[in-house]
Image: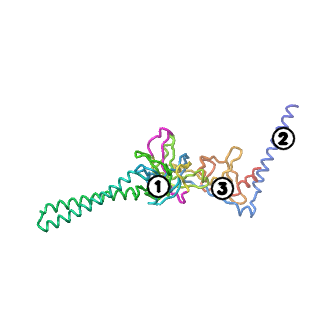
Amino acid sequence: MKVLVSSLIALSLFNAACATKTKQEDLQKTFVLSDKMLATTKTATAVIQPLQNELNFYGKITADNNKLIEIYPIVGGNVTRVFVELGDYVTKGQLLATIRSTEVAAFEKDLEDAKNDVLVAKNNLKVAKEMFEGKLTVERDVLEANSQYEKALSQLHRVEETYAIYHIKGEATFEVRSPINGFIIQKDINQDMLLRNDKSDNIFDIAEIDQVWAIANVNESDINQVRMGVDAAVTTLSYPDKKFYGKVDKIFNIIDPETKAMKVRIKLNNDGFLLKPEMRATIRLSYAEDRDMIAIPSNAVIFDKSKNFVMIFKDRHTIETRPIEVFRQVGETTYVIAGLKEGEKVITENQLLIYDALND
């Protein structure tokens, strides 16, 4: 009796399984896309293409060092006015601050002395010429007076050049002006501050940020995969849905002792000045490997029951659920190592609805 009961139970389970399988096969045979569903269903063809790879790194945005100017105080003294704040955009030649200084007062004295020396030398030369014409002196005296006059002019020009370089104005005032167009990214000066004559720290940093750098920290294990010229896509916390594109244009072939990583630079156009120096960034490098593989759109892949599937489309009457083995997903492209052939069509729109209808 026990053997008979066991046999009957096994037979019942077998019949139920067969019935389920037959039902699914019948459903697949009888399933037909409606005209409305067919009109909205999209497909893509499996193609063979070079295998792409992506590397993700963390880093930050920095100003282009070639377009960053540090401004140092030429003289010490009292800061009388500061006309800009951190983050302000300034133009070349714009007045940033004024400093009242005893050193500038000394320059003013040098200028007055130089002007007086020119005036005296000019008069001496005139007298020497008149005396020479009256036979009261020799030509050597005229040449010497002319030499003194030229020396006085040279000294005056030197002092005037100092005025132009240092932006010195009257009343012992030194003017700090911007040498370039850009943003104030560092400021270490305030009104009424007393600057020491030996101050060696810069008081302003000004950077042009129409182009910026993204600096990626590359782990030692990934160094051999980074190449010059590979494509890069940069995202930031401030603009998570916006990508900034560039290429690797410099590899710093040293390991930073603090981060234990090698730095890689990507130059980016910065329209609208969206990217700011010191922003944290995620940097994705993309490159092709030396092998080909079947590729399909990533949205065609259905993950269910710990496996990956695609819906193979032949016509509205013939649609197959096909398990596949995914090798790698890179953005919107998935590379398939098994389960697909070149030229087969996979459904990329309505695939979930069709999968549920055929497999529930």
Q: Write the residue at 20% across / 66% down.
A: 126
Residue 43 as seen in the image, left or right of residue 146: right
Q: Nearer the viewer, mark 3 or mark 2?
A: 3
Circle nearer the N terminus (1, 2):
2
Q: Classify mark 1: residues with Cα within 10 Å, few (<14), some (14-19) or many (20+).
A: some
Q: Which residue is mark 3?
A: 346
The three-letter amino acid code for the residue at tag 3 is Val
Q: Which mark is residue 97?
A: 1
Q: Which mark is residue 141?
A: none
Q: Residue furthest top?
A: 2
Q: Is residue 176 visible?
A: yes
Closer-to-camera residue (329/46): 329
For the point 19% across and 65% down, which residue is it? 127
CB under 8 Å between callouts 1 and 2? no
- The amino acid type of the residue labelled 2 equals Ser
Q: How many marks?
A: 3
Q: Is residue 302 magenta?
A: no
Determine which residue is flagged by label 2: 12
Q: Is residue 195 above or below residue 150?
A: above
